[in-house]
Amino acid sequence: MNASQVERFFATLKAANPSPQTELEYASVFELLTAVLLSAQATDVGVNKATRRLFAVAHTPAQVLALGTEGLEHYIKTIGLYRSKARHLLQTCQILIEQHGGEVPRSREALEALPGVGRKTANVVLNVGFGEPTLAVDTHIFRVGNRTGLAPGKTPLAVELALLDRVPEAYLVDAHHWLILHGRYVCQARKPLCHACAVINECDHGRHLKSATA
């Protein structure tokens, strides 16, 4: 995918969805961090069901800590790996209170120092919570980056760095959401919906399909 194709790719996605949003439900940066921490190997739908109940009773680090392990697990037990996630979240809340005044830090280094928070989670918080031009490469973005030819790479970090280099600045803040939604609903893993894809003319995979059937 060349530079003009990349521009058309994102211009098309923007025209279809000018203000993309995460599908995780949250009302503060701490709630966002909590939801993303709980979302590993879980669906947004499943996380939202659990956090609606959790945030109704605990939506600050101190309130979550006050629940204790059993109390927190009660609210998130429908989510996969809930025991380890509960442990990480409680440890994270302790650090937020002791080192950051109960607030979520805005630096990547401080975020990645939190238990259960890796580069992907940090990028989501920086992008969605603080509006930073970062991209969190999950399975959807990794697939879209490689399949379309937008940002090929053998690792999530390689795809992330390629995207940061290739996505025009005007689209960078929202690129994370456009790519996730495109991968989730159109450029799916097993059966990509190429017949319904608005960016097929810019996509390497789509052009190959067209040439094969020509």
Image (tube, rainbow, N blue to C red):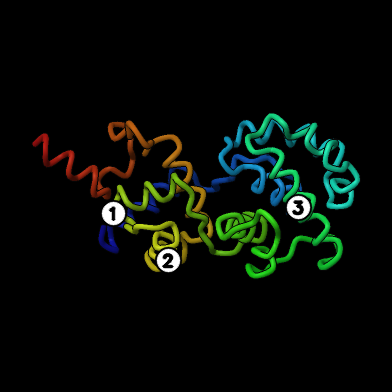
Tag of residue 30: 3
Quarter holding the C terminus is top left
Point out residue 165 in the picture as x, y percentages from the top left corner: 40, 68
Provide the residue designation for mark 1: 149
Which residue: 27% across, 43% down?
Answer: 200
Q: Of the residues shown, which amino acid type is indicated by label 3?
A: Phe
Q: Mark 2 falls on what kind of element?
A: helix
How far apart are the two marked residues, 1 and 2, measured between alpha carbons? Answer: 14 Å
Q: Position of residue 198 (x, y in %)?
A: 33, 40
Answer with left or right where residue 63 lies relative to residue 110: right
Is 150 rendered above or below residue 31? below
Distance in Å between CA atoms under marks 3 and 1? 35 Å
Numbered circles on residues, count: 3
Q: Type of residue at label 1?
A: Gly
Looking at the image, which residue is at 69% across and 44% down? 84
Residue 130 image-quadrant placement: bottom right
Q: x and y percent of residue 207 in the render?
A: 19, 45
Packing grade of label 1 (10 A; few <14, some 14-19, many >=20) is: some
Q: CA distance from mark 2 to mark 3?
A: 27 Å
Q: Earlier in the sequence, mark 2 or mark 3?
A: 3
Instruction: Give how far across and how far down residue 9 sits, in percent.
Output: 34, 52
Q: Residue furthest left?
A: 214
Residue contact at pointers 3 and 1, CB within 8 angstroms: no
Kind of element beneath mark 3: helix
Check disc 2 and give the amino acid type.
Leu
Q: Residues within 10 Å of mark 3 (few under 14, many from 20)?
A: many
**Tag 2 or tag 1, which sits nearer the N-term?**
1
Residue at the spot 26% in from the left edge and 57% down from the top edge? 1
- Which of 110/169 is in front? 110
